[in-house]
Image (cartoon, helix red, strand yellow):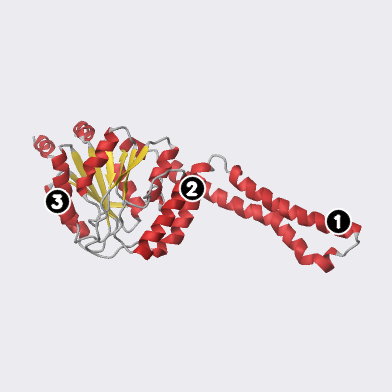
Amino acid sequence: MRALAAILGAMIKCSVVVPFLNEENSVTELYDRLKTALENSKHAFELIFVDDGSTDKTFTLLGQIAQVDSRVVVIKLRHRFGKTAALAAGFEHARGEYVVTMDGDLQHDPEDIPRFVEKLDEGYDVVCGWRAHRVDNLWARQIPSRIANWLMARLSGVGIHDFGGGYKAYRRELLNEVPLYGELQRFIPALAAAYGAQICEIPIQNIPRRYGVSRYGISRVVPVLFDLITIRFLLFYISRPLHLFGLFGFLSTAAGSAIAAWLIAMRFIYDTSIMANHGPLMIFAAVLILTGFQLLAVGLLGEMQVRHYHELSGRGRYSIACVLASPPKDEARTADQ
């Protein structure tokens, strides 16, 4: 059984990972469109649907699909862990040579998948879908997205236009090397670039959302800014933290020392009472010298601890309630015999 599963995994060209959260209106149509597009491509494939704690009928519908199609694997998380954790769960169950990620709200066209596969066949490691013509709200979505993408490209050094889009394709072995936690799914290309990945992007359609309401808006700006700081640190300073925190420490210490030197000169040259005339300034100098660098060091230690926890401890970032998958017909027949 295990040998047969390994052989089947080696034959799969493309694994499509789709996270769902309360998308009951989209499930069946998306499955039908995915199946049609992938069957027309003539490549062996599997569909990995991850239910990220939906409270509607999403998991029920996914389970019904898994019962009739052995190419479908359904993963149910115990509660809502977030898109990054849902993708990580899907990646760990993917067996295909290539892994394609897309959203479950019908805003991505499955007909574009063969184009992603073609680029991976050309030798690229990551292919990003670029929503060149956005159809969502200008002020709430498009402008914040453009600003965020510009900042991400500048801070990460990866020159793509659309970090936030969920339509991407990867070589599976690359995903095993990229750490995923928090909300870092939008930064997978940047993290992959740090491992020497070749990255490109292709224009895709941006289809208006037909069901439900988008969960992303202007409220995501602040979290994204924090993620930008994190990704900048992970990409450029994780192996040399003193290049960043040493600079802040030096500036803080230098400023505090300069103030302290001036106060000392006032005391001994002009015989000025420091406590009486410059007490608050003396305290400020002490704060610059002692606490400024310490606070930054705490941030450094915190980021290093998070990375250690997720990469070295082997602790999961999510909890799976169950995995549904029908055995292939040939395998089921062999088991019966």
Residue at mark 1 to residue at mark 2: CA–CA distance: 43 Å
> Residue 279, labelled with which disc?
none
Q: Position of residue 262 (x, y in %)?
A: 81, 57
Mark whose residue sits in front, 1 or 2:
2
Q: In the depicted view, which residue is nearer to us: 104 or 315?
A: 104
Binning the other alpha carbons within 10 Å of mark 3 as few (below 14), some (14 to 19) or many (20 upward) gives few
Which quadrant would residue 148 be assigned to in this image? bottom left
Callout 1 touching callout 3 (CB < 8 Å): no
Under circle 2, the secondary element is: helix
> Residue 155, labelled with which disc?
2
Q: In the depicted view, which residue is nearer to us: 136 or 275?
A: 136
Q: Quadrant of the N terminus?
A: top left
Q: Is residue 35 left or right of residue 226?
A: left
N-term-proximal mark, 2 vs 3: 3
> Residue 32, labelled with which disc?
3
Q: Amino acid at mark 3?
A: Asp
